[in-house]
């Protein structure tokens, strides 16, 4: 995994539109859209309200919004996701204990 270059710590709260060419990790509270050319990680303490778009998305915290990945969406055991998951067929991993309310939408690989 590529090193995380963008980090939002647990004591921070931000609102807006976040875009990065590198990986991003959210352990604080964020409201708005997040876009990365690599990986977006929402840690166990992270809370995101908004859409996340990246090749790889890993969630262990809370997300209220759509997840749109071209390679993989991984929902860890502590995760609570309310929104649609858009990713290619076979590219969604959900761990026991996670919660997901929404639709799975198969993304075209063409």
Image: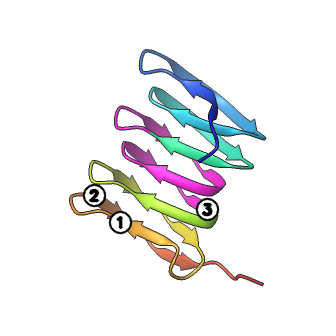
Q: Is residue 58 magenta?
A: yes
Over which residues does the magenta segment extend?
A: 43-69
Q: Is 7 on the left or on the right of 96, as rendered?
A: right
> Within 10 Å of the Cα at label 2, are there few (<14), some (14-19), or many (20+) other Cα atoms?
some
x 27%, y 48%: residue: 78
Sequence-earlier tag: 1 or 3: 3
x 64%, y 78%: residue: 107
Pointer 3 residue? 68
Q: In the rendered view of the protein, which quadrant contains the C terminus? A: bottom right
Sequence-earlier tag: 3 or 2: 3
Question: What is the x, y in percent for residue 28?
Answer: 45, 26
Question: What is the x, y in percent for residue 52?
Answer: 60, 50
Q: Name the foreground residue: 32 vs 62.
A: 62
Q: Is residue 82 magenta?
A: no
Q: CA distance from mark 1 to mark 3?
A: 15 Å
Secondary structure found at label 2 = loop
Depicted 65 relative to depicted 6: above or below? below
Residue 34 sits in quarter: top right
Q: Main secondary structure of the magenta part?
A: strand
Pointer 1 residue? 94
């Amino acid at each position: 995994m590529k090193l995380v270059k963008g980090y939002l710590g647990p004591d921070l709260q931000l609102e807006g539109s976040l875009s990065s060419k590198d990986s991003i990790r959210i352990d604080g509270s964020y409201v708005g859209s997040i876009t990365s050319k690599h990986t977006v990680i929402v840690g166990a303490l992270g809370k995101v309200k908004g859409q996340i778009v990246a090749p790889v998305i890993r969630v262990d915290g809370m997300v209220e919004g759509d997840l749109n990945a071209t390679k993989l969406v991984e929902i860890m055991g502590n995760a609570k996701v309310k929104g649609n998951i858009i990713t290619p067929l076979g590219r969604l991993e959900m761990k026991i204990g996670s919660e997901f309310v929404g639709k799975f939408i198969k993304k075209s690989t063409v």
